Image (cartoon, helix red, strand yellow):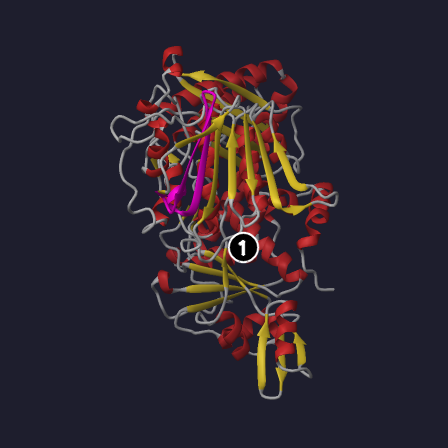
Amino acid sequence: MSEENKKNYGADSIQALEGMEHVRMRPSMYIGDVGVRGLHHLVYEVVDNSIDEALAGHCDHIKVMINEGDSITVEDNGRGIPVDIHKKEGVSALEVVMTKIGAGGKFDKDSYKVSGGLHGVGVSCVNALSDHLKATVFREGKVYEQEYERGKTLYPVKQVGETDRRGTVVTFHPDPTIFQQVSQYNYDTLANRLRELAFLNKGIKIELIDERRKDEEGNFIHDVFQSEEGLKEFIRFLDDTRQPIIEDVISMEGEKNDIPVEVAMIYNDSFGENLHSYVNNINTHEGGTHLAGFRRGLTTTLKKYADNSGMLDKLKFDIAGDDFREGLTAIVSVKVAEPQFEGQTKTKLGNREVTSAVSQAVSQMLEDYLEEHPNDAKTIVQKVILAAQARHAARKAREMVQRKTVMSGGGLPGKLSDCSETDPTRCEVFLVEGDSAGGTAKQGRDREFQAILPLRGKILNVEKAMQHKVFENEEIRNIYTALGVTIGTEEDSKALNLEKLRYHKIVIMCDADIDGSHIATLILTFFFRYMKELVENGYVYIATPPLYLVKKGAKKRYAWSDKERDEIAEGFGGGASIQRYKGLGEMNADQLWDTTMNPEFRTLRQVGIDNLAEADRIFSMLMGDEVPPRREFIEKNAIYANIDA
C-alpha cells in the first residue's frame, strides 16, 4: 500500500456491494449454521476485521472478551473504522460497514492487499444476527459510537469524547431467536482458533478473557497468544506429542510471483501424514492449488536428492509421492489478493498461479536445508525408503479389502445384518461393540433401514500402526467392506471414494463406560485418519444409550445422567428402584430400540471437526506413544469427566 493510500483510508474506501435483507431469514447461507459452529463464527468474523488491520500493518494487539450473559467484545488498536460520510450512501462509513452486506475496506485494493473473513460477508452479518451490537471507534483523537438492534441503527454515529488511543471496539450479543439451540460460548473453541491466528500472524498479541469464570486466585480465566516464530512454533505445538527424527523444523517465508508464502515442516517417527493449509488465515481443509504446489516441490526435490545420494540404487521399485509424506507434519500458508475458492464447503483454493509459487518456494527451501544438514537428509531418505517398502505391503492388503467390497463382487462381511432399503440417504448402520450387544441390536432394529455390524473387542489403534497393518486388520476390513467405499490410489492411498457409500448414517454404539468410550475413541481415530471424508460430510454419529432405568411400580423412565436420575427418582416420590446399565447387552431388544435406536426418541451426536489442526494434535496426544502429554491432558480435563467407578 502506498503512503498516500495509507493516509487516504476514509469513507470513500468503503464500498457497499448489496443489501442484507436475507441474512436474518437465511442465516445458514452466511455463517454455515445456527448451531455451535455458527455461534462461534460470529466471533471469528469480527476478529478477522482486526486481523486484516494487522496484515495491513496497522494493528498488533487484539483482545477478545466473553462477557457475563455470553455477549462478546472484540477490541483492537488499529486505525479505527472510518466515520466520515460515505458519498454514495449518505451516512457514516461506520454505519455502512455495520449495516450493508459485503461493505468494507477489503474490497478496496488500496486499503487491504489481502483479507480473510467469510469472503466479504463481514461484520454486518454479525450485526444482523445480534439482538444488540455496539461499535465504538477511537480515531483521529475522537471517540465515536453507534448502536444497533438486529442490524438496524438506533441512532446516527455520534462523537462521545476525545482520546489519545486508536482502534475499534465491537460488543455484540447473538440473537436468541436465531440461535435457539445454543447460546453459550465455549472458551476452548475460541482459544483454539485465536491460538491458530497468532501462529499464522507472528508478532500479533491476541488475548482471550472469560469474564464468566474465575481461577483459584480469583482472576478471570485468561490466555495470551503471541508467536515470534510463527509457523515454526505452530509445528512444534502440533507435533508436541510425536517424536521428531530430524533436529529442527524446516521453514521458510518469502514472496514468489507476488504471492507471500510461508511453509514449515518436520519429520517424525509416526506413519501418518499431517498437512494443514491456509489461505489468508482461512483453513482450507479441502486443500487446493497451494497444497498441490507443496507436494510437487517436496516430491521433486527429495526425489532428486535421493536419486543423487545413491541410497535408492538397491530398491527394486519406484518411490511414490505418498512415500515422501509419511511421518510428515507440515503447514502451508499463503496470502492471495483475490482467492478463488472451490469445493463443497468453499475451502479449496483454485488459483492456478499459486501452485508454481509454492512449488518454487518449497524446492528452494528444501534444497538449502538438505545441503546444509546432510545427516538429517540421510534420515529423511531412509524414512522414505521404509515408507515405500511398507506401501508395497499395504497395497497388497488394500487390494484384499477391495476384492471383498460389494462392487468387486466379494459380498458383505458375514457378521453384517443388512437392511432391505437400498437408498443410502435412508440407510443407517450401527457399529456395535461385541457380539452380545450386536445380537440385541439385531433383534431391536428396524430391518427396513437399519443395519448392524458387530465389532469384536477393541479395534486396532491406527495412530500407532503402519498402513499395511491397518488394512490387514479384520475388523477394519469389515468396516470398509460393509460401508462399500473404495480405498485410495497410489498417489493418495487414503483418499476415499464415497460414490458407493451404502449408508449416510454411520452410528458408533458402545457401552456407556470407560471401555466403551475407549472403543469409540479407537473407531473415531480410524475414521479421522483413514475416512476423514465421512466425518467432513456429516455421516458419522455417536449413539447415547441411557445410564439408568428408574422404576416404581408400573412407572419407569430412563436417565442419561446422575442429575436426571435423581430428578426422576424424586419425582416418583421416593422408593424407586434404580438399575445401572453397565453395557448395551443388559438391555433387552425393546429397551434398546426405545432409548437408543428409535429415530423418534433417540439422541445421536453428530461428529464434526471444528479445527483440523487441533483435532490432529488431540488424536496424536491421546492415541500416540508419548505418555506425558496424555497424562497432562487427562489431569487438566479430569474435572469435566464423569468417570463411573
Q: Mark 1 points at which residue?
A: 476
**113 lies above or below 212:** above
Q: Compared to 307, does 18 lie above or below?
A: below
Q: Can you tell which quarter of the image residue 341 is in?
A: top left
Q: Which residue lies furthest to the bottom in this view?
A: 553
Quarter of the picture holding the N terminus: top left
Residue 112 highlighted magenta (yes or no): no
Q: Where is residue 45 in the image (x, y as percent from the top left)?
A: 44, 37
**Image location of residue 198, percent across then percent down:** 56, 30
**Residue 433 as seen in the image, left or right of residue 413:** right
Main SS of residues in magenta: strand
Residue closer to the observer: 282 or 370:
282
Q: What stretch is highlighted in magenta?
A: 126-152
Q: Which of 299 and 214 is in front in this view?
A: 214
Q: Position of residue 567 (x, y in %)?
A: 63, 73
Q: Where is residue 292 in the image (x, y as percent from the top left)?
A: 42, 30
Q: Residue furthest top?
A: 3
Q: What residue type is labelled 1?
A: Ile
Question: In percent of the image, x 53 and y 19: which residue is there?
Answer: 252
Q: In which quarter of the image is the C terminus?
A: bottom right
Q: Count neighbours of disc 1 (C-alpha within 10 A) and say few if under 14, some if 14 to 19, many if 20 or more.
A: some
Query: As drawn, is 192 to the left or to the right of 482?
Result: right
- Which picture quadrant has residue 505? bottom left
